[in-house]
Image (spheres, coloured by chain):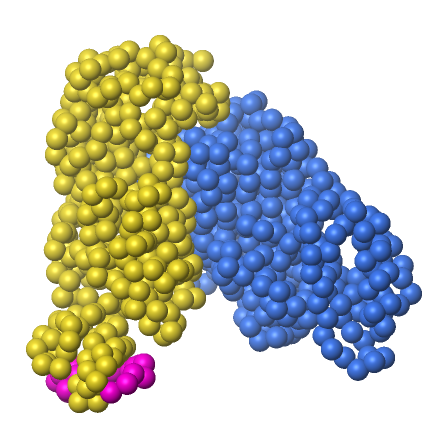
Chain colours: A yellow, B blue
Amino acid sequence: MSSPFRVALAGLGTVGGGTVRLLREQAELIEKRVGRRVDLVAASALEKPPGLDLSGVRWFADAVTMAAEAEADLVIELIGGAHGIALKVCETALTAGKHVVTANKAMLAYHGADLAALAESKGVFLGFEASVAGGIPVIKVLREGLAANRITEVHGILNGTCNYILSRMRQDKMEFSAALDEAQGLGYAEADPATDIDGIDAAHKVAILASVAFGCPVRFAPANVEGIRHVSAMDIKYAELLGYRIKLLGIARRSGTVLEQRVHPALVPVDAPIASVEGVFNAVAVVGDFVDKVMLVGRGAGAAPTASAVVADVIDVAAGRASFAFGVPVALLDAIEPAPLSVRAGAYYLRLMVRDHVGVLAAVAQALSGAGVSIAKVFQDERSPGEKVPVVLITHDTEESSMQAALKTIGAHPALLEPPRMIRIEQF
Amino acid sequence: MSSPFRVALAGLGTVGGGTVRLLREQAELIEKRVGRRVDLVAASALEKPPGLDLSGVRWFADAVTMAAEAEADLVIELIGGAHGIALKVCETALTAGKHVVTANKAMLAYHGADLAALAESKGVFLGFEASVAGGIPVIKVLREGLAANRITEVHGILNGTCNYILSRMRQDKMEFSAALDEAQGLGYAEADPATDIDGIDAAHKVAILASVAFGCPVRFAPANVEGIRHVSAMDIKYAELLGYRIKLLGIARRSGTVLEQRVHPALVPVDAPIASVEGVFNAVAVVGDFVDKVMLVGRGAGAAPTASAVVADVIDVAAGRASFAFGVPVALLDAIEPAPLSVRAGAYYLRLMVRDHVGVLAAVAQALSGAGVSIAKVFQDERSPGEKVPVVLITHDTEESSMQAALKTIGAHPALLEPPRMIRIEQF
């Protein structure tokens, strides 16, 4: 057997701890699969977590120093953060000719192409399976398993926190804030949940998926992101009555020369396979020209599933299975800018809170038809006269720009008691 | 750029034709991913299919001669059949130091370990992604994507013909024979459908999955196979009333030193994700100790999806991504024999056709309790006295051997108008 493959690990939080445990517990299995031992030889973190077995591991107070100086073949970066120390660790390791494996989606969303170029110039691998959808091996599936396909679309449920909140809102008719509280209590949401619930985390992941799927440099598109703060129990209820569930979706679609890349809540038909993905689970669907549609479902976060993805990348490198980070050499990546949300086409769900619904309905119908949007369905609960009534509309397929124009007119109507609530409908 | 990677193709049926088309249409994409051209240089089949562009391809009347003599780096075998010419082609190619990619599950179920050993001794790759679940890259996911896990279970819907028939029976309340006729008319079932509907095809695939998942030599277990001929529209209806759907499942589960490996129809809870996989789609769920459960869904057959899997293997080899065929070297495969069906434990669905249901129910209850099986639910339709009445039972979890003992006693009861119908229940 050849000499051990040496790994250094920066960051010992939840995923870092899980990775140490996995490397220890599965050492024998990994050696069988790789043909040589994979040893953790160095580690660095703000502090040594109690109870973690780090015997025989060289400790570095500074992760960047470790990336430069540790006698390791590969550095695992699990510090997090888009531009700070994590980036420095990865750049330093790659420059020193070490492979890098990271779970850092924010960093990749901003610096993915540059890091890939650096890795390529040094002849080392940049692995990031753990950055998207936790334990689900979707990067490998896109980059290798479906390599014979021209990918036309990737979409999915990419944030477990949001999916948990939306699932709980539906199951127990909870409002958003109560479900968020519960998620925080269970450790599914962070104390500052903004990155998750405002869709930023999912948008980082969509940017990475789009790059691997379409062979373009990673481009984070913050303008095309909408979170779930405004989704109400009422919308979830009406969606269900109309045969839909509400999910926070990340969508990347290549249509001709245009790249749609967006994150927003969406109504999906209740019998679509993705609708039944509940709680903290993630799902990613890929559409390719030969394979048609493939969907993957699994745990999108957590120490053990994410460690599974981290170590899968380590095993690939140790076993000599090289890949271009984004499936093709960086020089061959095709720059396609994400288009604005206005290129989107499809159906829309619209909820209006009104007092006199008859009068408003006429005005709304006129505003929609004036913008070229036709109504497929109208739904309203019976209420006493004078009471606030929700009027719910589903449109036929139309352009986002027409819908936005109609919304502007509708929003200005004096009988509206709240701004109109619009949610896109995705038919998968 | 380096010299082209040269491929020879044996067998030009549906999948072979799709593979030729894919290699032509995606030539540019493949070159970008591999870093060199992948050229089809030789082909062999019983006859040249009209309309297939084989310009520049050397034609061999005999596939074995081609495997030996073609100046190719890799031979794709798409002839089919477990022991005949296909096996000879693969052995010849491997012996000549050529990589082999095959979609031949029957051959692998019988000769997988021997072929892998031969490939290893020659330092070449044996790829068989296309042999299980068509376009779904489940072999790669098991072998590489989840390589950091000890896999405890793989199960799934592995035969699209059966899933189509069962879906149609449920949707349109058709009987088995009518649904089979329809499937044959649509080309989803062959003229001689036995291999599919008797579960043999799924059992070949389970044997391959078990080998990759658990690192054991492929062992086809024909004794543990039951098809769908006996599933009736009535059972599907009662299953639905009780909250279940009937699916033909392939299951491989490692429990301690025992390997459960079986194929049979099963009731699955209607809200289990696998229950919503309908029509010709396949699904495979993998359970690993770190990743928990990952499920993959996609097209399990057809020219284009299967070609996608064939060419993914070709791309891996051409790009220099080597793997052991079954995830570990053949010498390290652990021989675990599939255990007999009697080790199975779980709940059971039982349907009895009787005239006097009150009297029979007492006898049945006694037979079950005598064998240590307890009843969870009883269900019966109202009928006129003297008419044939179905009595449906669901048991609590029990051992297969107890259930079989009870079935023997029950089957001998004179009031039974038909043999009792038993279907296993799987809770996922």
Which span is picked out in magenta? A363-385
Instruction: Where is residue B420? Give x, y as percent.
Output: 79, 62
Instruction: Where is residue A352? Give x, y as percent.
Output: 21, 76
Quadrant position of residue A365: bottom left
Residue B341 can be seen in this image: no
Left or right placement of residue A235 versus residue B89 in this view: left
Residue in front for this viewpoint, A258 or B47: A258
Residue at the image position 50 percent from the left and 27 percent from the top: B328
Residue A373 lies within the magenta run: yes
Q: Is residue A310 above or below residue B398?
A: above
Instruction: Where is residue B176? Give x, y as percent.
Output: 66, 69
Left or right placement of residue B260 versus residue A110 in this view: right
Residue in front for this viewpoint, B398 or B210: B398
Quadrant, the C terminus of chain A: bottom left
Residue in front for this viewpoint, A249 or A125: A249
Residue in front for this viewpoint, B362 or B175: B362
Q: Which residue lies furthest to the right in this view?
A: B414
Q: Is residue B139 above or below residue A382?
A: above
Residue at the image position 44 percent from the left and 34 percent from the top: B290
Residue B27 lies within the magenta run: no
